[in-house]
Amino acid sequence: MKILWCAVFSVLGLLAMGYAILLHRVVGLGKNFTLFWPGLGCACLVTALILGLAAMGICHVPEMIWHPLAVGAGTLLALILYLEGRIVWAGSRLPDRNADYCIILGCKVNGDKPSTALRYRIEAAARYLAENPRTLAIASGGQGVDEGISEASCIRQELIAAGIAEERILMEDHSTSTMENIHYSRELIADAEARVVMITSNYHVYRSMELAKRAGLRRVSGFGAEPGPVMALHYFVREAFALVKDYLVGNL
């Protein structure tokens, strides 16, 4: 049995390290949770080494240490899989049609141009607004220290370029987090019974909808944009930990 688990952890460790190398080539390591992958890879490979040595009789892991670690790891894995199920389910559903508002959540702006993730969100918003001409848009997102304009301004200019009428776009340009996105955007919506669509990346839909409900919006749906094939796994895993954090600090 130890040999089998040694093989499993070896494969997982090598896959995690390979994905870390890919992320390093695409976005670099050291930011946005990316160090999780080399950390996971090292932990899996060290576990595989210990199991391999134990299987060969070179070292012995006491049951009083091994069993609690196995139970803890299994519990954490079960929790992550449960949260991932909620995240995937919410991100794959279709939004309500003809909503009163859609809130487009911002993310990184490069100079005055949208990052890839933000461009996908804007494209999803433009499609929804074109198909639902009565819906008003709330462009949400402040300006980071390394951004040339606010995320809200970037969303607005790109929507106008896509043919969305300027008078349909409201601005919220003070937020610096998802929770602030929702809080400040909520102030622009007078009616708690208004139908609202949260437009963001698909991995982010569930948390944004739950935060919107916590802010007092009662009729919320989501519309998820694809994050891109390379970053999808990273973002979905990161989002599960973000959910745990929001539950622990009382945001959800």
Image (spheres, grey):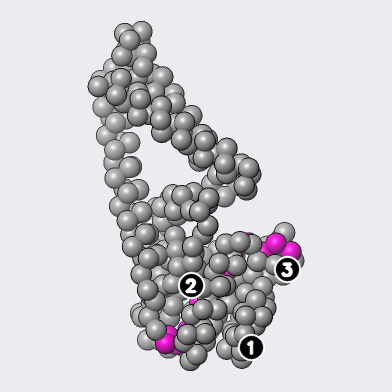
**Is 105 in the magenta?**
yes
Query: Visible in this render: residue 123?
Result: yes
Q: Which residue does the numbered mark 1 point to in the structure image?
A: 166
Report if the CB atoms under discs 1 and 3 are less than 8 Å apart. no
Residue 167 x, y percent position in the rendering: 61, 91
Quadrant showing the N terminus: top left
Spatial CA distance of label 2 from label 1 is 18 Å
Q: Which residue does the numbered mark 3 point to in the structure image?
A: 112
Secondary element at image label 2: strand
Q: Residues within 10 Å of mark 3 (few under 14, many from 20)?
A: some
Q: Residue at x 35, y 19 (%)?
A: 51
Report if the CB atoms under discs 3 and 2 are less than 8 Å apart. no
On the rendered structure, is 185 left or right of 47?
Answer: right
Return the disc, 3 or 2, that comes first in the chain's sequence: 3
Taking the view exactly as shown, the residue that stands out farthest to the top is 58
On the rendered structure, is 145 left or right of 188?
Answer: right
Q: Residue at x 41, y 56 (%)?
A: 243
Tell me the tag on residue 69. Answer: none
The amino acid beneath tag 2 is Ile
> In this rendering, is residue 251 above or below 15?
below
> In this rendering, is residue 27 above or below 179?
above
User: Bounds of the magenta span?
Assistant: 98-111
Secondary element at image label 3: loop
The amino acid beneath tag 1 is Glu
The amino acid beneath tag 3 is Asp
> In this rendering, is residue 142 above or below 247?
below
Tell me the tag on residue 199. Answer: 2
Q: Residues within 10 Å of mark 2 (few under 14, many from 20)?
A: many
